[in-house]
Image (spheres, coloured by chain):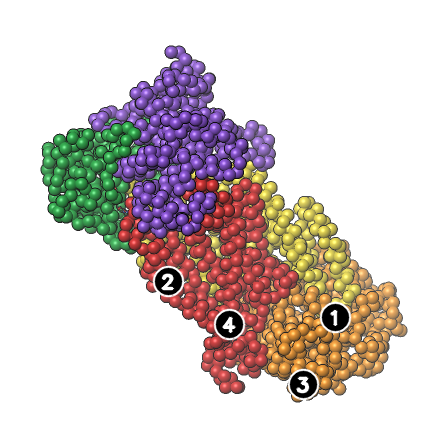
């Protein structure tokens, strides 16, 4: 009966069944059902053995990897080191890939197959994160998919992996159907078939759950939370995610779209002054945002990663609203009456972004900043301008995909350097040589303790000392399911059939 | 036409004692418009014998068409027949049910409209329009109906009727269309045809064709014809009797020759006088002064009185129809004598 | 246009009253239309005086309070403010937001309809009058516009020009003028063939004068009618754009934007955030349509009694 | 009559309404291997006629024979495809722009449908006064008086000048049309079926107005009608048109006494006459041919009782047959 | 007729060229698709790689002319997002949209014409008033709001119909369609209704107006004078005449149903073309948007052509070759 089939109402859609086509989230959470990786992550984004049972650094440039024995692909062929070689070679070379895995493999120098189940990999430079990067690559069967185009993967005879589910069919815009892989090496799912229905409108997804046409939905909007929580036939599962929502403060010298408190143009950028940035941070009531707007589906943030994640600096205290101190700081910086600014945000990019943007406007305004406008634009029209640095204060988010803080810290805060490809996400052009030094060192360090110490320091500089941006909260990932189902919520916001169990 | 059905025109009609086919008495038709009540027909009395051609003349808006439509019960809201009686072969049509009227329409009483461009449905082929008319009253099969259609088209002198049947109205000339309309009217050999200005929109040459056709028809089949027009000359050539209408009333009626030669009502005389042929070339025509009376506010008494040279105090009362000669009635207190007319000519 | 036979016996009584008086009387005969007109007048006044009658200025970020968010109708806020129709997520008083929203919706609707009608009418007239390649060109542009997705136009404008009431109006005008051009061309083609145009040509009055003084006024009744309905559909379209995040600035909501915002809370039972503005929008568009319908009947000589 | 050049003279005027063939048509013709059929209507075919000052020329013919088209050419509403129109003996091309305007205003037209020829949205004062004001014939201050004067002249009550056309009866509307034309002080009126839409009693009133104006304003008329008795009443000369050509032209008396062209004879025979007594109407043989595809030779030959081989191949030309009379018929050559 | 076709084809080629150029420029003006397609943590090198692999690094005119060159060979480009030929993507979504549009149209026509006829026959009656008021309501509610209310009432509240999605499909005559299964039909009802309400209102109004215009004309009177039954007068003489404007407008509306059912498809998670359009616009998936608009324009050209042909079938006075545009 019903227990055999699981219908998931998903808010996002994959672009392709080819797991190498793009590393965008919706694609990955689809691929994870069908394909395995060398290293998997658990619900807390900690690495756990996947197709690799062990890995060790023989020296700074060499890694030895042992593969799991006795694993078979969906078509019955055995899994061997050759498939790994094939997959690692294929992943960076998928044509027209909008977001390829090339970056993860950029330091890979060569692969040596020792035997069917052992590999030795060499890197071009010392790279502590190398093994984690390798871990993100999905392993395909050379026999089934060699020479196949991305679009060929819509055929179940090409989309062959070793994962817990077999691919059956995909109707773009509508649904994706999987059947259980009964020979799976890991835990076998409770569900014989899994149907993922793509329902991108939040309210429609909730409606589907409430009308019983799906069993579980993801990306539950905080708007619906109180109601769903109160319903007896529906359970809500929630976990703090690694997605940081922050307010970027544009520190470019040429950004002069500010006004004085009475509306006249202000010829300078007050955000270049750390005291001003600090003052703004003191005006934001993060608890207000998480409790009132997000209905608890968020955790106030102090830095790039939440507590419990590698690199989280305990030393950074939570920022509480303190208007008096904010005003004092502003006065100190030469803006006793505050200044005027427009707040920008995206619409429908992440949970309640437009509501949050408005609330930020309100909080700043109530704190004495003249908020000239609050502008919310669809992401397509928003992000190019944000990247070009055209907004003074704007809402953005960063989803940590690796289980530690280095990637985020260097992307967001390293001084922008196009040549060396550093500070790519540093849209506000924050720049502090001291910070750069610390983070550069962290990225080269193999010793975990030392690395973590450096990351703490980097976080302290960026968040505590410089207020390079205003961290707001970590989004919570929320699922809702009909009673009788248990969902193991994942911090990486992946909606997986493997995480769903029939309650016992 | 299905076998066994007698063409109506050839049956002896006299179901009534007086031998009248149509007897209209005191017919009143009104339109309740926003501006008020328009009395389009205000107590018309009129009779028609089988085979007779009656001309109904009068200026625009005098109620000729409305009289015609009233007979067929085709007055659409906001209009209605508010009084009087229409006896057709002794049968009362005022207040008759829909079914009765529908059976009568097209079979016993047919009508031809003024504008041949508008009477045929532009989006239906000629054959459809004729065949449906045949089948509205007989149980003929499609092919029988088509046969009948060909027959009548030939009868009204349409060349190559087979091809015409497949045409749409716009592919035919005005004269041809009017002949098709006449053919439809003839389908069931009605005993009465109401022709509402059927030639006004047509050229002289085509007018002649149509008048010829209708004349022959009445003569041959004994169909009575009510010919509505404002063209006195046409009436003169074809009708037996004529009724002159003014502001919803028949002001004069009688044999066509007598009425046109020596009109007794001042209005009829005005009409006759204003025809160019009755005037000297190049000189001003004699015209009726003033403007037609508004049907919304008819003057008390004789409606023509404000425009009449002969009007007196007495004309403020409604004149009754008086007999002024053999078979001639005039609604006037001061009917003109033949001599007066001759004097003026 | 008054009751009359085809070849013209006028009903003289009508002469005493100017045409507009009659039409007005006829308009007022429909109780529904009369009521709708009143509703529109009231709504217009409410929109016009929104700053005066609204208990709160929903644009003023310092007046709204996050912590008064999601209050059901009739609640009293922390500061003692009474939210008659409840508050939205930001703590905005719904009643005030609706009054201002109505103002924005009507402003956008009326203005975009006026411009779209204006442009459409001019191009349609020119197409009909000039004929030939000018006509063909204009009509192909019309075809082009009709097949062009509104969302794309709106998004491009948003990206290029930024956000704002003016830009939304521009987007609505761009996607809607084509309908009018086509409609007016059809009407003008008929008018152009009438003899009064020939008479004007005979009097040597010049093309521009004939076009704008003679043909245009006679195309107006249908245009006025489509125009009224256009206001309604522009309001509705703006609401749709807002729903897609392409409408007005989020802090200066129209009714459509309010509904779109509340849409997310409908399932959560916070019905007032979208149902009240929805009802107000419904009433406004409904009344406009009723009036437009009635106007069409009154101005259509074919339907006159 | 007056001396001097004719007020209006048409020389070899033709008007062709052709369908313009574009690229697509040509490709289609190539594809279907069909020659491009010239779907042209020769509405007016090589007409030459002159109208002397003060005269009334009646123009008669069946529907679709090109009367209105000819009238429009004379009134300057449409350009002839070939030939030329001379006003007072002068070509349009030889005129200064001022002269051209004057010439255009000199010839005015009265239309058939009194309702559709008046702009339903303009008040009488504007209908009549617009052109004089635009052309600077009167100043704004004088306009009101001027309009009143025009209205009085055509027998309209000037107090009605603020009314709209629909508030008038058919006859009054036609008077407004006449006043509008007269307001630009024309010397020539083209009356295109100007009384056809009116009923008898109103017809008489309007006809009388024409006759009266002719005398008082020294007007010249081209009087188009298919009502032969009306034409007989008002015209000095009559021209008969058949399918774009003038087939006979001559003084009214002589024409009505003895029409020459077989078509003219046929027309006259069909006119219903008052006082003619009961008569049998005889159907005219044949149908009016389509102007798209006129018969060869003499256009009338398919319906002509006197048809000969020559009529089928050769189009007869207008030749004098008597003093001031011309006809286009091969029969005349035999006599 | 052939000349007419050629003319239409030539004109549509012009329109298509213009459409493709404008869409190209428009999306260029909005921004760079690569920035949207990449995940949050993408590096600059990744961005550059993506831009290069999508061919977005070449000058715009060059991109456009390449596109034109390919288009002539029938290749309208490959989706940035799905890496599938855009035409394939569009046609894969077509059946779902078509069945929705057809159902909505059937609702509108089968209900609208009778209601409109009846209301037009009895103007001012209670029935007429009700129908007219109802039709105005159909006009007055924004589509998305209507859709949400339908879901609230029928799916969540009463629970009698599924809230969204396309149900089970089966094959009829080799075409995969929802009409084949009961589940499919159940899923169709709400979205079709959502789309139909506006068209239904339009249909009622068109029919009603048409009836009122035609009913007083001479030929209707003449048909009555022939003794025809009221039913025949109505269903043949009146209806056939008013069908001309109805068919014209409904043709256009059907086109827009197919092309722009965006909102309904989004709310009801219907895997049709409209949803593809809005997703593609949001992702700045230029090849799909360009191809989409071109397909839609072409569809409008074809629909207009069919309408014109239907027009001349319905109204013999209209000659196809006659008036050029
Ligand atoms: N549907 C209507 N609504 C209001 N008044 C009408 C209607 N039909 C006719 N009338 C009025 O009835 C009167 C008589 O009209 P009718 O059509 O019978 O005149 P007629 O004698 O046939 O004139 P004509 O020669 O112009 O056809 C006119 O005054 C007209 O205004
Ligand atoms: N604008 C035009 N385009 C094409 N053909 C035209 C045009 N105007 C007139 N015609 C054609 O020219 C011919 C003569 O038309 P015209 O109107 O001059 O005839 P008429 O003698 O005035 O007829 P009627 O008595 O019906 O008014 C007709 O066959 C008509 O179809
Ligand atoms: Mg009549
Ligand atoms: Mg004419």
Q: Is residue D200 above or below residue A269?
A: above
Q: Is residue C108 above or below residue C128?
A: below
Among the two numbered marks 1 and 3 on one chain, the one whose residue lies closer to the N terminus: 1
- What tint does the image give chain B? green
For image coordinates 40% across by 22% down, the residue present is: D247
Pick the residue in front: C83 or B183: C83
Pick the residue in front: E58 or A263: A263
Q: Secondary structure at mark 3?
A: helix
Q: Chain of mark 3?
A: A
Q: Secondary structure at mark 4?
A: helix
Which chain is represented by purple in the image? D
Where in the figure is residue C150, as x and y percent of width and height?
A: 57, 58
The residue tagged 3 is A327
Q: Could you tell whether A447 is left or right of B108 in the image?
A: right
Q: Quadrant of residue E288?
A: bottom right
The residue tagged 4 is C100
Q: Chain of mark 2?
A: C
- What tint does the image give chain E? yellow
Q: Nearer the viewer, mark 3 or mark 2?
A: 3
For image coordinates 30% across by 29% down, the residue present is: B282
The residue tagged 2 is C33
Pick the residue in front: B314 or C236: B314
Q: Could you tell whether D15 is left or right of B248 in the image?
A: right
Disc number at residue A254? 1
- What tint does the image give chain C? red
Among the two numbered marks 2 and 4 on one chain, the one whose residue lies closer to the N terminus: 2
Q: Chain of mark 1?
A: A
Where in the figure is residue B345, as x and y percent of width and height?
A: 19, 30
User: In this view of the protein, can residue D244 be seen by the observer?
Assistant: no
Q: Nearer the viewer, mark 4 or mark 1?
A: 1
Do tags 3 and 4 sit on the same chain?
Answer: no
View quadrant of ligand 1: top left
């Amino acid at each position: 009966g019903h227990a055999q089939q699981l219908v998931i109402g998903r808010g996002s859609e994959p672009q392709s069944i080819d797991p190498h086509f793009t590393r965008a989230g919706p694609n990955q959470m689809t691929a994870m059902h069908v394909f395995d990786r060398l290293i998997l992550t658990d619900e807390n984004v900690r690495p756990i053995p996947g197709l690799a049972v062990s890995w060790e650094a023989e020296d700074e440039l060499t890694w030895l990897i042992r593969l799991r024995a006795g694993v078979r692909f969906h078509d019955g062929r055995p899994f061997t080191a050759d498939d790994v070689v094939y997959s690692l070679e294929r992943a960076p070379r998928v044509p027209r890939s909008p977001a390829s895995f090339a970056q993860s493999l950029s330091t890979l120098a060569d692969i040596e197959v020792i035997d069917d189940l052992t590999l030795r990999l060499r890197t071009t430079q010392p790279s502590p994160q190398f093994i984690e990067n390798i871990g993100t690559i999905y392993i395909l069967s050379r026999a089934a998919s060699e020479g196949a185009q991305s679009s060929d993967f819509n055929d179940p005879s090409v989309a062959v992996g070793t994962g817990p589910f077999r691919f059956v069919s995909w109707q773009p815009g509508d649904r994706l159907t999987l059947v259980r892989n009964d020979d799976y090496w890991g835990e076998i799912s409770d569900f014989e078939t899994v149907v993922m229905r793509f329902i991108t409108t939040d309210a429609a997804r909730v409606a589907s759950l409430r009308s019983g046409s799906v069993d579980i939905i993801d990306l539950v909007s905080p708007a619906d939370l109180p109601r769903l929580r109160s319903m007896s036939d529906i359970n809500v599962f929630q976990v703090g995610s690694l997605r940081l929502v922050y307010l970027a403060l544009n520190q470019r010298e040429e950004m002069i779209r500010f006004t004085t408190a009475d509306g006249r143009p202000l010829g300078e950028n007050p955000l270049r002054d750390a005291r001003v940035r600090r003052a703004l941070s003191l005006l934001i009531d993060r608890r207000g945002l998480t409790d009132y707007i997000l209905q608890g589906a968020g955790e106030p943030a102090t830095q790039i990663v939440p507590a419990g994640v590698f690199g989280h600096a305990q030393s950074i205290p939570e920022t509480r609203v303190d208007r008096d101190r904010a005003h004092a700081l502003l006065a100190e910086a030469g803006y006793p009456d505050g200044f005027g600014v427009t707040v920008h945000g995206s619409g429908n990019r992440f949970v309640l972004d437009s509501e949050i943007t408005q609330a930020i406007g309100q909080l700043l305004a109530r704190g004495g900043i003249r908020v000239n406008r609050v502008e919310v634009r669809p992401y397509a029209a928003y992000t190019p301008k944000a990247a070009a640095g055209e907004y003074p204060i704007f809402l953005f988010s960063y989803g940590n995909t690796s289980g530690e803080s280095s990637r985020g810290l260097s992307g967001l805060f390293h001084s922008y350097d196009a040549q060396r490809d550093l500070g790519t996400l540093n849209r506000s052009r924050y720049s502090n040589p001291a910070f750069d030094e610390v983070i550069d060192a962290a990225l080269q360090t193999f010793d975990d303790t030392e690395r973590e110490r450096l990351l703490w320091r980097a976080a302290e500089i960026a968040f505590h000392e410089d207020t390079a941006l205003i961290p707001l909260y970590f989004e919570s990932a929320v699922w809702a399911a009909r009673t009788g189902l248990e969902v193991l919520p994942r911090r990486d916001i992946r909606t997986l059939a493997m995480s769903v169990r029939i309650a016992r | 036409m299905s076998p066994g059905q007698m063409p109506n025109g050839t049956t002896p009609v006299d179901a009534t004692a007086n031998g009248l086919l149509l007897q209209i008495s005191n017919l009143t038709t009104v339109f309740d418009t926003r501006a008020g009540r328009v009395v389009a027909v205000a107590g018309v009395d009129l009779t028609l014998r089988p085979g007779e051609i009656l001309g109904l003349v009068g200026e625009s808006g005098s109620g000729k068409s409305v009289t015609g439509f009233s007979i067929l019960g085709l007055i659409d809201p906001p209009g209605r027949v508010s009084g009087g009686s229409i006896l057709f072969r002794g049968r009362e049509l005022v207040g008759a049910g829909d079914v009765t009227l529908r059976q009568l329409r097209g079979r016993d009483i047919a009508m031809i409209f003024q504008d041949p461009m508008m009477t045929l449905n532009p989006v239906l082929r000629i054959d459809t329009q004729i065949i449906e008319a045949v089948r509205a009253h007989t149980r003929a099969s499609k092919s029988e109906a088509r046969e009948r259609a060909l027959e009548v088209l030939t009868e009204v002198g349409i060349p190559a009727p087979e091809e015409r049947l497949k045409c749409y109205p716009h592919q035919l000339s005005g004269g041809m269309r009017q002949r098709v309309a006449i053919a439809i009217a003839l389908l069931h050999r009605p005993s009465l045809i109401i022709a509402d200005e059927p030639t006004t929109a047509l050229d002289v040459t085509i007018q002649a064709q149509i008048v010829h056709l209708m004349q022959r028809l009445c003569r041959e089949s004994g169909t009575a014809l009510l010919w509505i027009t404002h063209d006195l000359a046409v009436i003169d050539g074809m009708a037996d009797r004529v009724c002159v209408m003014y502001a919803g009333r028949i002001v004069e009626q009688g044999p066509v020759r007598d009425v046109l030669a020596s009109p007794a009502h001042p209005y009829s005389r005005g009409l006759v006088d204003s025809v160019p042929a009755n005037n000297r070339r190049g000189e001003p025509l004699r015209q009726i002064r003033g403007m037609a009376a508004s049907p919304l506010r008819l003057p008390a008494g004789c409606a023509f009185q404000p425009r009449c040279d002969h009007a007196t105090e007495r004309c403020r009362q409604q004149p009754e129809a008086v007999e002024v000669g053999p078979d001639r009635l005039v609604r006037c207190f001061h009917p003109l004598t033949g001599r007066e007319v001759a004097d003026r000519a | 246009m008054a009751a009359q036979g085809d070849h013209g016996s006028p009903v003289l009584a009508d002469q005493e009253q100017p045409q507009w008086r009659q039409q007005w009387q006829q308009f007022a005969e429909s109780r529904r239309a009369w009521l709708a007109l009143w509703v529109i007048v009231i709504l217009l006044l409410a929109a016009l005086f929104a700053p005066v009658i609204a208990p709160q200025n929903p644009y003023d970020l310092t007046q709204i309070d996050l912590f008064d968010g999601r209050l059901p109708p009739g609640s009293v806020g922390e500061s003692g403010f009474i939210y008659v129709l409840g508050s939205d997520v930001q703590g905005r008083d719904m009643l005030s937001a609706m009054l201002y929203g109505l103002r924005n919706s009507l402003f956008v609707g009326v203005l975009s309809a006026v411009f779209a009608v204006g442009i459409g009418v001019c191009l349609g007239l020119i197409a009909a009058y000039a004929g030939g390649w000018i006509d063909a060109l204009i009509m192909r542009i019309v075809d082009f516009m009709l097949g062009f997705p509104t969302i794309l136009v709106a998004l491009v404008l948003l990206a290029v020009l930024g956000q704002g009431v003016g830009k939304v109006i521009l987007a609505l005008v761009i996607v809607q003028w084509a309908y009018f051009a086509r409609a007016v061309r059809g009407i003008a083609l008929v008018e152009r063939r009438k003899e009064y145009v020939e008479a004007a040509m005979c009097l040597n009055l010049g093309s521009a004068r004939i076009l704008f003084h003679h043909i245009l006024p006679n195309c107006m009744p249908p245009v006025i009618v489509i125009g009224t309905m256009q206001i309604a559909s522009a309001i509705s379209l703006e609401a749709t754009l807002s729903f897609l995040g392409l409408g007005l600035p989020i802090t200066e909501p129209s009714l459509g934007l309010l509904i779109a915002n509340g849409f997310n809370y409908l399932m959560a039972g916070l019905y007032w955030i979208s149902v009240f503005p929805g009802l107000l929008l419904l009433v406004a568009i409904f009344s406009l349509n009723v009036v437009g319908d009635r106007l069409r009947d009154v101005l259509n000589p074919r339907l006159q009694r | 009559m007056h001396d001097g050049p004719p007020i209006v003279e048409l020389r070899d005027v033709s008007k062709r309404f052709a369908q313009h063939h574009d690229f697509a048509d040509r490709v289609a013709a190539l594809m279907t291997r069909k020659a491009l059929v010239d779907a042209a209507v020769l509405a007016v075919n090589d007409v030459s006629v002159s109208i002397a000052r003060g005269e009334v020329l009646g123009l008669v013919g069946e529907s679709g024979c090109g009367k209105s088209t000819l009238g429009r050419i004379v009134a300057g509403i449409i350009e002839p495809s070939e030939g030329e129109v001379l006003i007072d003996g002068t070509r349009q091309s030889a005129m200064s722009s001022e002269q051209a305007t004057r010439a255009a205003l000199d010839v005015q037209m009265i239309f058939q449908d009194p309702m559709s020829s008046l702009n339903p949205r303009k008040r009488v004062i504007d209908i009549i006064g617009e052109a004089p004001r635009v052309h600077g014939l009167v100043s704004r201050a004088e306009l009101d008086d001027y309009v009143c004067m025009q209205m009085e002249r055509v027998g309209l009550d000037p107090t009605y000048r603020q009314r709209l056309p629909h508030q008038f009866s058919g006859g009054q509307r036609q008077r407004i049309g006449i006043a509008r034309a007269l307001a630009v002080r024309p010397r020539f009126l083209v009356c295109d079926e100007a009384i056809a839409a009116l009923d008898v009693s109103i017809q008489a009133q309007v006809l009388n107005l024409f006759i009266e104006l002719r005398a008082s304003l020294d007007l010249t008329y081209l009087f188009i009608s298919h009502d032969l008795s009306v034409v007989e009443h008002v015209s000095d000369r009559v021209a008969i048109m058949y399918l774009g050509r003038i087939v006979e032209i001559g003084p009214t008396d002589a024409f009505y006494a003895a029409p020459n062209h077989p078509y003219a004879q046929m027309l006259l025979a069909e006119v219903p006459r008052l006082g003619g007594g009961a008569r049998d109407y005889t159907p005219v043989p044949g149908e009016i041919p389509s102007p798209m595809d006129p018969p060869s030779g003499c256009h009338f030959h398919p319906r002509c009782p006197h048809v000969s081989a020559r009529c089928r191949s050769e189009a007869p030309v207008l030749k004098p047959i008597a003093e001031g009379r011309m006809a286009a018929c091969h029969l005349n050559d035999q006599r | 007729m052939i000349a007419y076709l050629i003319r239409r084809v030539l004109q549509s080629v012009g329109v298509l060229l213009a459409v493709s150029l404008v869409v190209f420029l428009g999306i260029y003006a909005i921004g760079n698709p690569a920035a949207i397609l990449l995940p949050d943590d993408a590096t600059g090198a990744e961005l550059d790689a993506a831009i290069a692999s999508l061919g977005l690094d070449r000058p715009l005119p060059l991109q456009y002319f390449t596109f034109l060159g390919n288009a002539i060979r029938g290749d309208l480009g490959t989706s940035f997002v799905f890496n599938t030929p855009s035409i394939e993507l569009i046609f894969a979504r077509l059946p779902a949209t078509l069945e929705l549009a057809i159902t909505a149209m059937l609702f509108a026509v089968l209900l609208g014409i009778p209601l409109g006829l009846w209301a037009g026959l009895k103007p001012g009656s209670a029935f007429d008033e009700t129908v007219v008021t109802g039709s105005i309501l159909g006009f007055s509610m924004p589509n998305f709001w209507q859709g949400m209310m339908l879901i609230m009432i029928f799916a969540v509240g009463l629970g009698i119909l599924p809230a969204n999605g396309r149900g089970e499909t089966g094959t009829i005559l080799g075409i995969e369609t929802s009409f084949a299964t009961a589940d499919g039909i159940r899923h169709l009802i709400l979205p079709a209704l959502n789309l139909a309400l506006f068209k239904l209102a339009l249909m009622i109004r068109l029919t009603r107006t048409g009836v009122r215009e035609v009913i007083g004309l001479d030929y209707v009177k003449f048909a009555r004078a022939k003794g025809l039954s009221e039913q025949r007068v109505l269903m043949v003489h009146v209806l056939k005449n008013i069908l001309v404007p109805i068919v014209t407008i409904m043709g256009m509306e059907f086109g827009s149903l197919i092309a722009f059912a965006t909102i309904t498809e989004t709310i009801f998670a219907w895997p049709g073309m409209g949803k593809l359009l809005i997703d593609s616009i949001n992702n700045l998936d230029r090849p799909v948007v360009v191809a989409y608009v071109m397909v839609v324009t072409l569809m409008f050209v074809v629909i207009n052509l069919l309408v014109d042909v239907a027009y001349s079938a319905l109204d013999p006075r209209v000659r196809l070759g006659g008036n050029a545009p």
